[in-house]
Image (cartoon, helix red, strand yellow):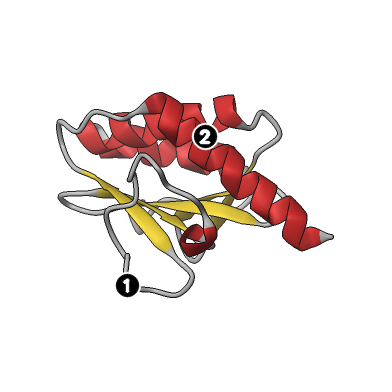
Amino acid sequence: MKKSATTKGESPSGLIDARIKELDDWRGKTLSHVRALIKQADPEVVEEWKWGGVPVWSHDGLICTGETYKSVVKLTFSKGASLKDPSRLFNSSLEGNARRAIDFHEGDEIDEDAFKTLIRAAVALNRSSAR
C-alpha cells in the first residue's frame, strides 16, 4: 500500500480490499481471485495483515501469504514442503525445507480445483499440528 495509507483501525479484510483496489491491474485481479478460492476452500479462514502490509490467510496456523511484486503474485505456504502437490502448483521456493510458493504471472490460468485441494490440505496439516 502507499506509504500515506493508514492502517490504524482498519480490519485486515478491509486492508486486503484496499490493496486489491490499489493494484488496479492483473495483479489485483489475481490476488482477488486466489482470495476468493481460499475462502471457497475454507469458509472459516481468517484474514490477517502482517509484516507491514502482507495479506495472510490462517486457520489453526498460517496457510499462506499473498505478496505482490511488479511481475508476480506470490503465494507462500509456510508448510508447503510438507504438502502433497500432485498437480505441481508449487513453482517457486522449491529448495527450502519448509516453505513452498506459487508464482502467478500475468495471463496464468489457475487450476481452481487443485488450488482449493492444496488449501484444504494446508488447513488439515495445521489442524494435525495443533493437536
Badge 1 or badge 2: first in the primary sequence? 1
**What residue is drawn where x is 48% and y is 41%?**
16
Residue 105 lies, in percent from the top left, at 18, 42
Q: Is residue 87 visible?
A: yes
> Which quarter of the rendering shows the C terminus?
bottom right
Residue visible at 17% across and 52% down? 70
Q: Residue furthest front?
A: 86
Q: Nearer the viewer, residue 84 or 23?
A: 84
Which residue appears at 40% of the width and 43% of the height? 86
Picture disc at residue 35:
none
Q: Is mark 1 on a helix, strand or loop?
A: loop
Q: Quadrant of residue 101?
A: bottom left
Residue 5: % across, % down: 42, 51
Q: How many marks?
A: 2
Q: Which residue lies under the disc numbered 2?
A: 117
Which residue is pictured at 15% across the width and 36% down the height?
106
Other residues around mark 2 within 10 Å, as few (<14) / some (14–19) / many (≥20): some
Mark 1, Cα crowd under 10 Å, few <14 / some 14-19 / many 20+, is few
SS assignment at label 2: helix
Judging by the rendered image, the residue that carries numbered circle 1 is 95
In the rendered structure, the answer to whether residue 129 lies left or right of residue 90 reads right
Regarding residue 10, the answer to whether it shows in the image is: no
Which amino acid, by three-letter code, is at mark 1?
Answer: Glu
Using residue 10 as the reference point, say whether residue 128 is left or right of it.
Answer: right
The amino acid at mark 2 is Thr
Could you say where residue 60 lies in the image, as x and y percent from the top left? 73, 52
Relative horizontal placement of residue 105, taking residue 18 as reference (left or right): left
Whether pointer 1 and pointer 2 mark residues with C-beta atoms closer than 8 Å, the reply is no
- Residue 107, image x, y percentages: 15, 31
Q: Distance between the residues labelled 1 and 2?
A: 22 Å
> Of all residues shown, which one is farthest toward the right?
131
